[in-house]
Image (cartoon, rainbow, N blue to C red):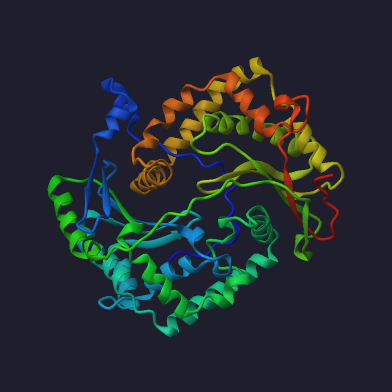
Amino acid sequence: MKKISYIGMVLLALVMVSCASNAGAAKAKGASYYESNAADFSTVTLSNGIPVVFKKNNSGKIYVVRMVIDGGSSVIPASKSGLEDAVLEMIQYGSEKYPYTDIQRLKFEQSFSITSSTGFDYSTYNFRCIEKYLDGVLDVFADIFLHPLFKSEDFDKLKTEYAEGIQRSLTDPSGLLALTMRKVAFEGHPYASNPSVIKESYDAITLDAIKEHYKTILNANRLKIVVVGDLAESVQNNLVEKLEASFGKIPSADFTKPKIPDLTVRGKTVYEKLEQAGDSGYAFGFYLCPERTSADYIPYALATMYIEEALFSQVREQKGAVYSAGSGIIGGEKLLGVLSVYRASKPENLQQYIYDAIDSFPDERGVAEKLDQYKNKYINALFSSAQDASGVAGNIVSSLQYYGDPTTYLHRAEKVQAVTADQVLTAYRAYLARSSINAANGKVNPIRWVVVDKDGRYTFGK
């Protein structure tokens, strides 16, 4: 089962939908990036309506299967934050055919993994294995999902893990910062329901609550399946038969994916005092940024690369004010941009150092001078995250959930290449500039800060 990470609840690296890994071959054949990959996709629908997306991938005999569960934490009350995560953890403690000890033995002998993850808009239940063991692992995977044991002694173990994780998060500056920012940034929004179990929801995560929520997951209208591997026709046909015999029996019930409202940014700086921070300061500043479907999204992503360089060279290297400072995003269908400060060492003028670095953004000519370099960096990041079946599966799931088409990610590289210096500068002015002289129409996009330190010396937002 997966480890529970509370520090990792905030995504500090800019989310980028990845590209397939065989672009070199595509270029050699003269085919477009999309054309060379789109033919490797096929979709079948199980008798109960569950779509199964297959993607042929030639990166070895590794297979990845992901069950996608629509809704995520946004369909759960904030008072029960982490309930879906708890369900997906609990089912992995054993099933009718496969007790927990047998699952662990098989994992060791056959080198496969079964994992889960929970997000704001959807959750996934996954396995990864080599082709030799595909049939057997699929049987384990299906029985765990369809026939879990939900034993009270296993629930007690899980609750202990959650308690220990919560305690770690509350006594670690980065963990406390992540928790506080989510609470502040998403207050009153469906994303206020944390994908992970938190202190405020711990007592509400009972075995009965897990069993009840599990029933809502067994709904064909909430499910999709993605399969990535070296799919010979016979292998794919066999998989369809096995998926139909197991997941194809899941009943359908009414389910309407919740409409996620826009996020807002307002309010004063929030401060948390924590002795364990020592003399260092930790901070997140969040602000509105373009949505995934916006024409500004990729130009904005490229603009943050210029910001990253300025923060490193000016705030870290020249001023020696932080161990690291960067940018990223949080959210799901709806997003917020984030500026991050990790282990600040100079409380005086720190915010000004950061804002001055952001406002040193180059003019259009300066942007153009480095634009190809940053485009290549962006595209290299896209390629590196799709070097194996797991990366490809992740791209497909994201494309399905946020764009409604499993192949959307295949267009990402060409969209990056099409961005102009003017578009990058326009995105900077709209979302990132910190002074009215640099901002679009003189209107600075507000930032709200969350700060953790020992005694309140690291002040932001003034």
Q: Is residue 311 left or right of residue 119?
A: right
Q: Position of residue 9 (x, y in %)?
A: 57, 56
Q: Residue at x 32, y 72 (%)?
A: 103
Q: Position of residue 228 (x, y in %)?
A: 29, 48
Q: Residue at x 58, y 78 (%)?
A: 203
Q: Residue furthest bottom?
A: 153
Q: Is residue 208 left or right of residue 40?
A: right
Task: Answer with the quarter of the image where residue 348 lies.
Answer: top right
Could you say which is closer to the camera, residue 22 or residue 434? Answer: 434
Please state, as top left, top right, bottom left or bottom right, where the N terminus lies in the image: bottom left
Q: Is residue 287 above or below residue 145?
A: above
Q: Is residue 459 above or below residue 217?
A: above
Q: Position of residue 420 (x, y in %)?
A: 54, 19
Q: How many dots with numbers?
A: 0
Q: Residue at x 65, y 35 (%)?
A: 308
Q: Residue furthest top?
A: 365
Q: Position of residue 359 (x, y in %)?
A: 75, 29
* Residue 20 in view of the camera: no
Task: Answer with the quarter of the image where residue 249 lies.
Answer: bottom left
Q: Residue at x 25, y 55 (%)?
A: 49
* Residue 249 in view of the camera: yes
